[in-house]
Image (tube, rainbow, N blue to C red):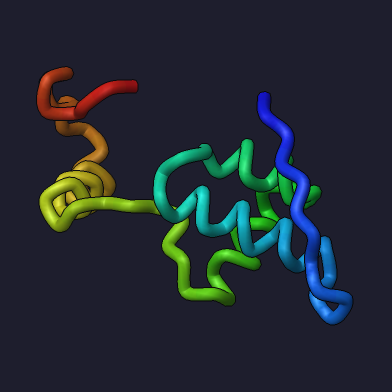
Amino acid sequence: MNTLTVDLPFDVDPDDARLLLTMKLFEEGKVSLGKAAEMAGYTRRTYMELLGRRGIPVFNYSPEELDRELEALANPSASPPPAEERGPT
């Protein structure tokens, strides 16, 4: 892991700066939700709430993926799609 040292203006709280940096890294797909929460010093649940307050989606589904997920929830007895359609696990 790398370490970043930044000189902040006196009126910028280091915890706020850390939170904003981790949110951007998560939003850009550079770090996972769990890693971003850990780096920011929050639980995953609290971090998810903070992301929501900023309008940053926690889940990034395409419309097609969302339709498949909703269909699977509506028909739990249906078999899951083939692995190549589900994507990496």
Q: In this view, does 30 lie to the left or right of 9?
A: left
Q: Is residue 55 above or below residue 38?
A: below
Q: Residue at point 81% right, 74% down?
A: 9
Q: Which residue extends farthest bottom?
A: 11
* Residue found at x 18% / y 46%: 65
From the viewer's side, name the closer residue of 80 and 24: 24
Q: Identify the residue at image location x=17%, y=49%.
A: 71
Residue 87 percent location from the top left of the image: 21, 27
Residue at horizontal 47 percent and vertical 74 percent from the top: 55
Tell me where residue 50 sits by quadrant.
bottom right
Residue 8: percent from the left, percent from the top? 79, 66
Q: Where 55 falls versus 5 (above or below)?
A: below
Q: In which quarter of the image is the C terminus?
A: top left
Q: Is residue 43 left or right of residue 22?
A: right
Q: Position of residue 20 (x, y in %)?
A: 63, 63
Which of the 4 image quarters holds residue 88?
top left
